[in-house]
Amino acid sequence: MYDVIVVGGGPSGATAAEDLVRSGHSVALLDRAGRIKPCGGAIPPRLIADFHIPESQIVAKITTARMISPTGRKVDIPIENGFVGMVDREHFDEFLRVRAAEAGAERLTGTYLRIERDKDGTHVVYREKATGEEKRATCRLVIGADGARSNVARDEVPGGDRIPYVIAYHEIIESPGPRGEYHPDRCDVVYDGRISPDFYGWVFPHGTSASVGMGSLVKDVNLKEATAALRVAAGLDDCRTIRREGAPIPLEPLKRWDNGRDVLLAGDAAGVVAPSSGEGIYYAMIGGRVAATAAAAKLKTGRIRDLQLARKLFLREHGQVFRVLGAMQRAYYRSDERRERFVSLCHDIDVQRLTFEAYMNKKLVKARPLAHLKIGVKNLAHLTGLVGPERV
C-alpha cells in the first residue's frame, strides 16, 4: 500500500514524487520509459534556483532572443541580468526521475491501463514493460501527470477528456556552431502564418545540438514541411537529424484538477502550459509541487476538499500571468498582420525589459507603472490600427 502513486515521470510527476517522499510519504512513480517529449527545453533562472537544478543539466545559456515577423523583420532582445537556460529533455527528465528514486520513490516501469477500487483501496492497473503482464499497485491517492492527453484525466476527472491542445513537432539536430541565421547563444522565435497559422516556430540551441520545431491547432498543417522550412531559413537543412518527436501541448488549465475522491492531476494533464509562449517545464514542476502539497494535506486531514488546494495555489500565484498571456495570444496570433504588429511592439525597450523580468522571475512586474502605461497605449494603438506595423 503506497500513500500515492504518481502516473507519469515527466518534470511534473517526478517533482510531485520527490516532494512527497521527502515529506515522509510512500510513493510509487509509474512511467513508460523511453518517451522523450518534444520541447524547446527553455527554463528560467527561477526554476534552476527553486528546484536545485545542477549546472551539469544546463546544456546552453541563451543571452538573446530574436523575434522574426512574417515579413522577415528581426528584433533582437538582449536578456539583461540573466539568461534562459536550456535543457535536453532526454537527460533532464531522467535526472528528475533518478533524483525522486534516490529520495525514496519506488520506480515502476510500464503503461497505465486503468484505476480499480475495492474494499482494499485504490488500485492502479498497468502493463509492466519488462514482462508485458498486467500488474496492480495499491494506494490511497493517485496523481495523474501523464501529459496533455492524459488517460488518468480522461478516466477520472470531469472534463478531463476535452482539454484543447496544440500539436507540437520538433527535430533535434546536430548544431554546427554559428552559421547563416543560426547562433548557439540565441533563441529564434518565428511568428509567420506560413510556418504556423496560430502558434509559432522556434530554433533553440542545446549546446552540441539544437531543437527546431513548431506547433499548431490546425489539423491540416504539415508539421514536418513547416519544420523543414525553418531549417532552410536558418541554414540548418544539411545538419544531421538526431531524432524527431511530436506531442500535444495543452492550451489552458482545466476547470477541475481532481475527481472529488482519490485522483488529482498535475502538469500537462491539468493544462498548465503558458498561453502565447507555450512554456511548460517551469509550470509543470510547479504543478507537481502544488499537487504534492494538496495530496499531503488530504492524506493528513482526510478532507476531500484539500485536493482542490493544488489548483487554488497554482492560480493564486500564476493565474494573472496566464490571463495576460492568453489575451495576448488571442489578440496577436490571429493573422500575419497582427503578428507583424506584435513583433513591431517588441522593439520597445520597456516591452523587452518587462517581458524578460517577468520570464525570469515568473510574476508580472509592477515596479514601473509608467512603463506599463506606455506599453498599454502602444498595444492599443497597434490593435486598433492607429499605427502601422512599421512604426516602433
Image (spheres, rainbow, N blue to C red):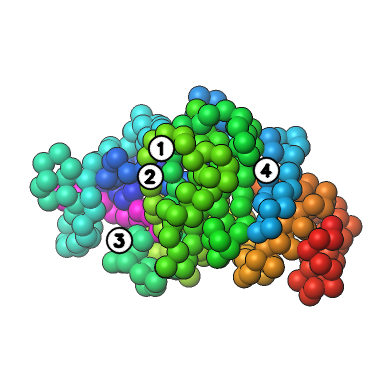
- Between marks 1 and 3, how big is the CA–CA gap? 31 Å
- Magenta segment boundaries in residue numbering: 135-148
Kindly indicate whether the residue at mark 4 contacts the one at mark 3 (C-beta within 8 angstroms). no
Q: Secondary structure at mark 2?
A: strand
- Between marks 4 and 1, how big is the CA–CA gap? 24 Å
Q: Type of residue at label 4?
A: Ala
Question: Mark 2 vs mark 3: which is more N-terminal?
Answer: 3
Q: Residue at x 34, y 48 (%)?
A: 8
The image shows residue 137 at horizontal and vertical percentages of: 20, 49
Kindly indicate whether the residue at mark 1 contacts the one at mark 2 (C-beta within 8 angstroms). yes
Q: Quadrant of the C terminus?
A: bottom right
Q: Type of residue at label 2?
A: Arg
Depth-wise, is mark 4 or mark 1 nearer the camera? 1
Question: Mark 1 vs mark 3: which is more N-terminal?
Answer: 3
> On screen, 284 above or below 59?
below
Judge whether residue 311 is colored magenta. Answer: no
Question: Mark 3 vs mark 4: which is more N-terminal?
Answer: 4
Q: Secondary structure at mark 3?
A: helix
Q: Is residue 58 visible?
A: no
Quickly name the residue at label 1: 241
> On screen, 253 above or below 103?
below
The image shows residue 292 at horizontal and vertical percentages of: 44, 49
Q: Residues within 10 Å of mark 3 (few under 14, many from 20)?
A: many
- Between marks 3 and 4, how big is the CA–CA gap? 36 Å
Q: Type of residue at label 3?
A: Asn
Question: Mark 4 vs mark 2: which is more N-terminal?
Answer: 4
Q: Is residue 234 visible?
A: yes
Quickly name the residue at label 2: 244
The image shows residue 158 at horizontal and vertical percentages of: 37, 72
Left or right of residue 5: residue 81: right
Q: Nearer the viewer, residue 373 or 365?
A: 373
As drawn, the label of residue 151 is 3
